[in-house]
Image (cartoon, helix red, strand yellow):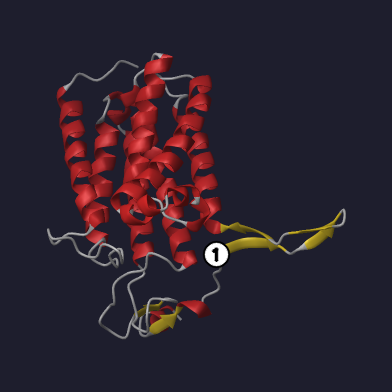
Amino acid sequence: MLTEFFAAAVDFTTLPVRPQAFTIPAFSLAGSEWGPFALRWYSLAYITGIAGAWVLMTRMIRQPGAPLSQKQLDDYITWATLGVIGGGRLGYVLFYNPDKYMADPMEILRLWDGGMSFHGGCFGVVAACFLHGWFSKYSGLRLLDLVATVTPLGLGLGRLANFVNGELWGRPTGTDWGIIFPDAGPEPRHPSQLYEAGLEGGVLFLILTLLFWFTPARLRPGLLSGVFGIGYGLSRYIVENYREPDRQLGILDSGLTMGQTLTLPLIAAGLLLLVLALIRKPVSQ
């Protein structure tokens, strides 16, 4: 069956995936009609990513020399959630579709219609790390290292949810192989969402987890964050060559997509953090 999958185009609508994890049909209660209510995989990806990050970080701060307490971590999760949602939405509005939202600013609040930017969410989480660290009197950079280590979990789940939604599809493969996505035309396309889930999620999560648990990387502030910035940036830059550019933007005058353009500063910041982490003395346990 695997050979057949790679030998011909697959119609997305024939795959056993649906955007809704489950649906509660409409029902009557107290003389009123309620529903239907649906829980989407995309929402579950956010919830599971944040909850999973909290569980993993709870284990991580039990190691000697941890930068913050359990209570401080619990408080930070709320800040991080606001940073992800607020930063992700604002980033999409500013970088990907400013004309649409400036014409009708109330559309910005319609989160259920989609439209989130990783780079905006990343900025929101970084800001949350340093602000919470400043208010709570601990190193925001060391918290950022913890966050960077677990973030690929949420990224991978989010990309899988993009695939299930049949959105953010790839460019035409130019061959008989690929996936024919609804609303994307009859051409077989790259499942770029799965490429991103594998690189930004699986591979990056494995690298950072090994560095945290089996090397002294956690004692060099900024090192894990730097590896994340470089790893995510390179992964995103590569996969953008197979991902269909945003319809309203296309390929920019620079010859890059918006995703590639926003990723270059992230790679540069990652390199800077990595160099500084290696030349500074490690913290004590």
Q: Residue 162: x and y, percent?
A: 44, 61
Q: Is residue 22 above or below residue 56?
A: below
Mark yes or no: residue 213 visible.
no
Most extreme residue toward the left is 254
Residue drawn at (13%, 62%) of the image? 255
Residue drawn at (67%, 62%) of the image? 23
Q: Residue 31: x and y, percent?
A: 87, 57
Most extreme residue toward the front is 103
> Is 101 left, or right, of 270 in this rendering?
right
Q: Nearer the viewer, residue 119 or 201?
A: 119
Q: Nearer the viewer, residue 148 or 244?
A: 244
Mark yes or no: residue 101 visible.
yes
Q: Which amino acid, mark 1?
A: Pro
Local crowd at mark 1 within 10 Å, few (<14), some, or many (≥20)? some
Q: Is residue 209 above or below residue 156?
A: above
Name the image quarter holding residue 283: top left
Most extreme residue toward the right is 30
Residue drawn at (26%, 61%) of the image? 239
Query: How many labels sit on residues?
Result: 1
Q: Residue 95: x and y, percent?
A: 29, 50
Q: Residue 70: x and y, percent?
A: 52, 22
Considering the numbered disc 1 on the image, is that residue within a helix, a strand or a loop? loop
Q: Is residue 220 above or below residue 81?
A: above
Name the image quarter holding residue 2: bottom left
Residue drawn at (35%, 30%) of the image? 127
The quarter in which the C terminus is drawn is top left
Q: Which residue is mark 1?
A: 19
